[in-house]
Image (tube, helix red, strand yellow):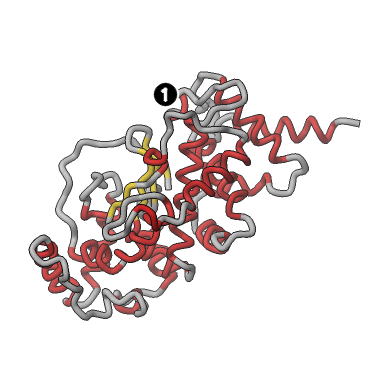
Amino acid sequence: MSIRHPVSVYPAPPSPLSTVLAARFAPLHRELADACGGTPPALPKSSRRKLQKEYVDLLSRHMGLTLPPHVKGRDLAPIFSADLVRRQVDDSECPGWDNLMQELESRSIGEVGRLAEHLRHMEMERSRDPRTSLPESPLLNPATPLLPQLRLEPGELLELLGGCEIDLLGTYCVEEGITLYYARIGLCAEALGVDPFALGLVVYTHELAHLISHRGLDRDSSDWDTDCFQNSSTYTLESIAQWYTFLAVAGRDEETAFHALLRGQSEPYTAFRIWRHEPLIREYVRMAMIEIRRSYMADNAKPKGSLFERVRQLVKFSKDLP
């Protein structure tokens, strides 16, 4: 989860394991797309459960921001990438994932390569016969634990994932909107021992919080200047997204997945935890966020940006009052 800028690098061919993971987690793709307003194959538009609107409303209420009329549902709907299959987006900015796939392929059974070749052939034939069904394989059966098939312990996978770039599970890009990497989400969910759909909703909520913090309007109809937003401190951007994701998922089924993921995340994603037990902290974080949005200057003058310093000042001021 992070913010990244689009690149124009010609996409590399998918690795065999990426192709297999894309097929295994295709049901997760459909389920997340159904919930978040995407466009899954073979699901009519009317079947969507509109969790997208629910989370937009939750985040907007917590942030005190409203989306302008020109931000439509399609702007909030994620596009989905099956990792290196790259039908919709170029994913070449995460070389750590490429390296991880190569590492897993080097230690896993030879069935991965054979199965991937079969799946690619099926994809070419699917336009001629849409009834084509997936072959029988434990690698493709969602009911079969995947990590033993890849000869991995859950903790070992999390350690390997730590070497990937920070935009591992999802991104918010100013030009392209939200992207969810559903095969990665499914793989991480098994390693964390959480429901993959719940983890996908956590990632979606985090990226949606980036979008609303950028494009949402405050009570004076001001948004966050795009150049300032893109060049602000990683700590500020991720702490805002994480704080409001934390508030949005509290008491919901996704809360367990949020905290499980949090245990393995780096400091820009965990720094917000120091705020949780301060009185009036929701108001102080919002006030600091609004001040930074209105400054029209990139919030990168300090290692952690100015958000944490401003929140600290507000908390200290309230404690100094008689």
Q: Is residue 155 above or below residue 87?
A: below
Q: Is 218 on the left or on the right of 31, as rendered?
A: right
Q: Secondary structure at mark 1?
A: helix
Coordinates of residue 291 in the picture (x, y in percent): 61, 24
Residue 130 visible to the viewer: yes
Q: Amino acid at mark 1?
A: Asp
Give the class, few, some or many, for how many residues have Cα within 10 Å of label 1's Cα (few <14, many ≥20). few
Q: Classify the position of the C terminus by image quarter.
A: top right
Report the front residue among 91 and 220: 220
Please identify the residue farthest to the right as the structure is shown.
Answer: 322
Which residue: 44% across, 70% down?
155
Which residue: 55% across, 25% down?
293
Residue 3 visible to the viewer: no
Coordinates of residue 241 in the picture (x, y in percent): 53, 42
Which residue: 43% across, 33% down?
71
The quarter holding residue 82 reads bottom left
Report the front residue among 144 and 160: 144
Which residue: 51% across, 19% down?
296
Please identify the residue farthest to the top as the structure is shown.
Answer: 296
The quarter holding residue 292 reads top right
Q: Is 208 on the left or on the right of 9, as rendered?
A: right
Coordinates of residue 136 in the picture (x, y in percent): 21, 80
Please identify the residue farthest to the front as the structure is shown.
Answer: 46
Q: Is 101 on the left or on the right of 268, as rendered?
A: left
Report the residue marked by disc 1.
227
